[in-house]
Amino acid sequence: MTRRPPHRRSNRMERWQRRVLVGLGTVVVIMAALAVVLVIRNALGSSGLTGQPGASEVASSTTGATDPATETSPVTSGNNHEEPAGPTTTTVAGGTIPTLPPPPATFVEETISASDLRLQPEGLGPIPFGTDVNRTLNTLTAALGAPDADSGWLPATVDQLQCPGTRARQVTWGSLDVFFSDGPTDWGADGFEHFFSFSYSLNPGSSSPAGPSLRTSEGLQLGATLSRSSSIYGQSSLTRDHPTEGTILEVEVPGPGYMMGVFAETDDDLLLVSLGGGTGCRG
């Protein structure tokens, strides 16, 4: 009887099955690892710790919708104009966070030159009536240099002033006199020390002013004729005879403001010898 070699089919089947099982196990391990990575990625994305947008952010950016939970509403007045001051609030989960307005701008003194000054019914060019004393003096001193005279604060009723208020002060640069009062005037309340008047005149017997050469915003200068002065201001001016000053030209503006020119008679014409603005003093 012939002996047959041993039957090895079962061994080959076992090896094939092991290979299949190993392959399946490898696939399962890889899929499990991918699942863990995806879970961690989604968790980090929803907490905002990654640079990639989450699902809610993508939906918001693609639809253009605003999340009402984080919308900031400005405080507005009844006339629908946004108020510059006052905090806004931002609603977030757990409460509201006030958003404070920016701090107010710090005033910076404007540096001007003598050529920037203009004689006006409302003040001296960039320095309007009602400006406080320190700012007025600092600005004028920077433009004109140190004053030639300063009366200091005096009782407003002294003969040389006769100004409104309880106390008054006169500061002089050449032919320019600047007056201050503690009010009340048309430009400042009672107790507020402020600039309220000026006077600019030719020196007696001279055809030119001392110190700075100034003019009005319309170009009128001392020494101009009455006819030219009247033509410059037109219907906003009035010419009349004053009981003590002689011929004067008054210029008025819609708001608080006043300017008066005084004319002196010469051989040829009436010439402008003085310009005053504001309430004026009688001293």
Image (cartoon, rainbow, N blue to C red):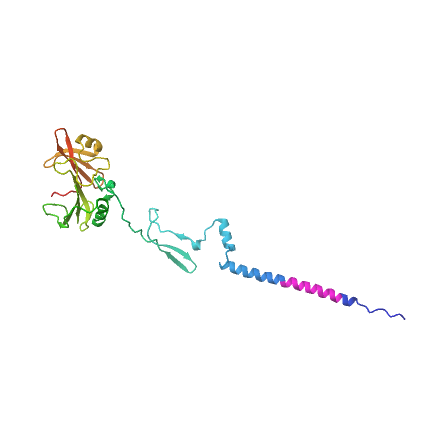
At a point 71% along the width and 66% down the height, the residue shown is 18
The percent coordinates of residue 234 (x first, y second) are 21, 32
The span shown in magenta is 13-29
Q: Is residue 128 left or right of residue 266?
A: right
The percent coordinates of residue 72 (x first, y second) are 40, 53
At a point 76% along the width and 65% down the height, the residue shown is 13
The percent coordinates of residue 176 (x first, y second) are 17, 42
Does residue 13 sit above or below 181 in this rendering? Answer: below
Q: Is residue 95 left or right of residue 108?
A: right
Q: Examine the image and state in which quarter residue 232 appears.
A: top left
* Nearest the eye: 251 or 211: 211
The percent coordinates of residue 236 (x first, y second) are 21, 34
Q: Is residue 63 magenta?
A: no
Residue furthest to the top: 268
* Nearest the eye: 261 or 143: 143
At a point 51% along the width and 60% down the height, the residue shown is 44
